[in-house]
Image (tube, rainbow, N blue to C red):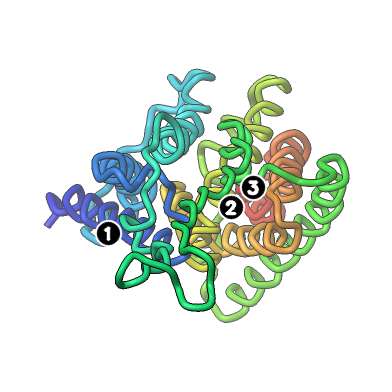
Amino acid sequence: MTSLAGPLAAALGLAAAFGLDQLCAARGLLPPGFHQPWRRLLAGLIVAAFFAVAIFLPLAAAVTGVAIEPPNLSKIDNFQLFELHLIMVAVMGMWLLLGFAGRIVQERPEQAGLPVPALPPPPPDGGEIPGEEIWVQPPEPSPPPRPPAIPLGRRLMAQLGFLAPDVPREIGIGLTLGLAAWLAVLTALVAIAGALIAMGAKDMVPQQPPALVPLIAALPFGVRLAVSLSAGVVEETFFRGFLQPRLGIVLSTAFFALAHLSYQQPFMLVGITLLSLIYAFLVRWRQSIWAAIAAHALFDGVQLLIVVPMVLKLTHGTAGKTAALLGLFG
């Protein structure tokens, strides 16, 4: 039973990558480079490998009863804190470059299934047309002018939702709504925890935050700030800029929540899912990811720079439960 975790994660990763490919095609979002099968296949395998390891392996382990050995937190260096984010950037970069970079052969109309303009037929005898002077072969229609080439960097930014008419304004909206989201989600978590305790299900409420959160909260200020900014930029770019337009809000939110399953605290997924939905609808409303980036970075910054270091000193009774809830790390 335990040996099935790896194959199950791989199968789920392949299925998710295939679904991503098919939804891209159905929504007209398939990159032009994917007309070359080798590009499309390679991009799909890269995404499948990431899905399998980063998103579905914790789920497969939970389903098959495998206990994933946690990392030795005392030996984690600063680089490892950003390792997953760097992998996300690499996956997005390879997928987009395979889809948009390099020399992409343009299809002729007949190859793409488009109608080809037909010339009028000549007269049957090659002579004059009654009522006309002389039949003259019309010139071949000239091809329509090509639109000006869009720089590759701008195309990739558009694919990830970075283009916006006023970026500072979007960031301001994100910071304002991010603070409101932090308060709303925290209030919801405290209310849910209170309801569970009242119903006698206090074991479902975490007694302490995930072990990694206090470790990060004890790092120097600059490192914690970098972690917060990295989470806001990279995770929003991947889940909301890359996945959401192609998979939709429901699936991209589910993937975001599953990516945090490795914290081994199911109650955390409630807050993470609520935050993900807020960020998702923020992206849909603003039609760019800048506001969501700002909101996400603000949330993590408030947690790591202010809240967690303050409340981790409270370890008993109600204060301990509050510290655990405040240890939510999205």
| Inter-mark Cα distance, 3 to 1 | 25 Å
Residue 24 figure quarter: bottom left
Query: Which residue is the site of mark 2?
Result: 240
Query: Which residue is the site of mark 1?
Result: 15
Which numbered disc, 3 or 1, marks the residue that appears first in the sequence? 1
* 101 is higher (above) or lower (below) than 263: above
Q: Are marks 3 and 2 in contact (CB under 8 Å)?
A: yes
| Inter-mark Cα distance, 2 to 1 | 20 Å
Of badges 3 and 1, the one in the foreground is: 3
Residue 2 image position (x, y, % from top left): 15, 52
Residue 65 figure quarter: bottom left
Front position in the image: 109 or 102? 109
Front position in the image: 73 or 233? 233
Judging from the image, what secondary structure is the residue with disc 3 in? Answer: loop
The answer to whether one can see residue 282 in this image is: yes
- Report the amino acid beneath label 2: Arg
Residue 302 image position (x, y, % from top left): 76, 41
Which numbered disc, 3 or 2, marks the residue that appears first in the sequence? 3
Q: Specify the label residue 230 is tagged with.
A: none
Query: Which residue is the site of mark 3?
Result: 161
Of badges 3 and 2, the one in the foreground is: 3
